[in-house]
Amino acid sequence: MANDRAQRLRLLEAARLYFVCEARPHGRDPDELLDAALRGGAHIVQMREKSPRSVEELVAFAEPFRRAAREHEALFILNDRPDLVAACGADGVHVGQEDMSVAEARGAAGTEALIGLSTHSPEQIEAACGASGDDRPDQLSVGPVWETPTKAGRPATGLRLIGLAAREATVPWFAIGGIDSENVTDVAAAGASRVVVVRAIRDAEDPESAARALRRLLEGTVGGVRPAKQATGADG
């Protein structure tokens, strides 16, 4: 957890690997998983809890995320609940196109918070990057590149949208959707320098090694050139 907005923006700009998971992944406390992901090179952790929960439960569930982010000098982001950013000690919130406007999220989360926004089309990327003031998001996710069970029913956007974001986006953005160690170099070659993953770390036998492999593969693909050898890791 960062101390102020300026520090949060610096950490966001430097971030490359963004890990998202539910409050109790596989029904377990998240402490070990979060620590492993952050040791392996994740720069951001997000708690995305879609099950109906009370405010008290969400605040309690957020504590391991807040603590892990603080210990690793990383960012902690909530999903969907800008009204709970302060109570959870989060650095910001991520909202979808159907949730609320960026300005509304910023008003609820506070002026120091980072606001992320999901985008799924060229028009949505253009609108987000063309916004100003409180309407301008601090960060975008672009995708889903491939269909994923975490976004059931949302069609894949493919790599073409990643290429467009690489050319047109004027705020930090992360490719998202079905990304793992088998395809992250394809995403990087298409123009992404940042990715969001869920299963590729959460479901790995060795989450720390999975995160480290993702970072290595992502950062090893420079100027659209794939590395000569690829490591293998989690399926994502």
Image: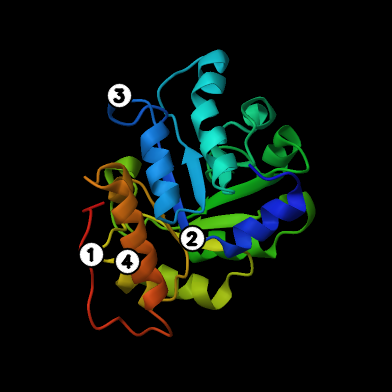
For mark 4, does the 10 Å Cα neighbourhood hold few (<14), some (14 to 19), or many (20 or more) residues? many
Question: Which residue is found at the position 54% from the left and 27% from the top?
Answer: 63
Q: Position of residue 101 (x, y in %)?
A: 65, 43
Q: Which residue is mark 3?
A: 27
Q: Which residue is mark 2?
A: 174
Question: Which residue is found at the position 51% from the left and 53% from the top?
Answer: 43
> Is residue 127 visible in the rendered structure shown here?
no
Q: Which residue is mark 1?
A: 182
Of 15 and 190, the residue lying toward us: 15
Of 190 and 19, the residue lying toward us: 19
- Kindly indicate whether the residue at mark 3 contacts the one at mark 1 (C-beta within 8 angstroms): no
Query: How far apart are the two marked residues, 3 and 2, measured between alpha carbons?
Result: 27 Å
For mark 3, does the 10 Å Cα neighbourhood hold few (<14), some (14 to 19), or many (20 or more) residues? few
Please state which amino acid type lies under the numbered disc 2.
Phe
The answer to whether residue 135 is above or below residue 107 is: below
Q: Secondary structure at mark 1?
A: loop
> Is residue 74 visible in the rendered structure shown here?
yes
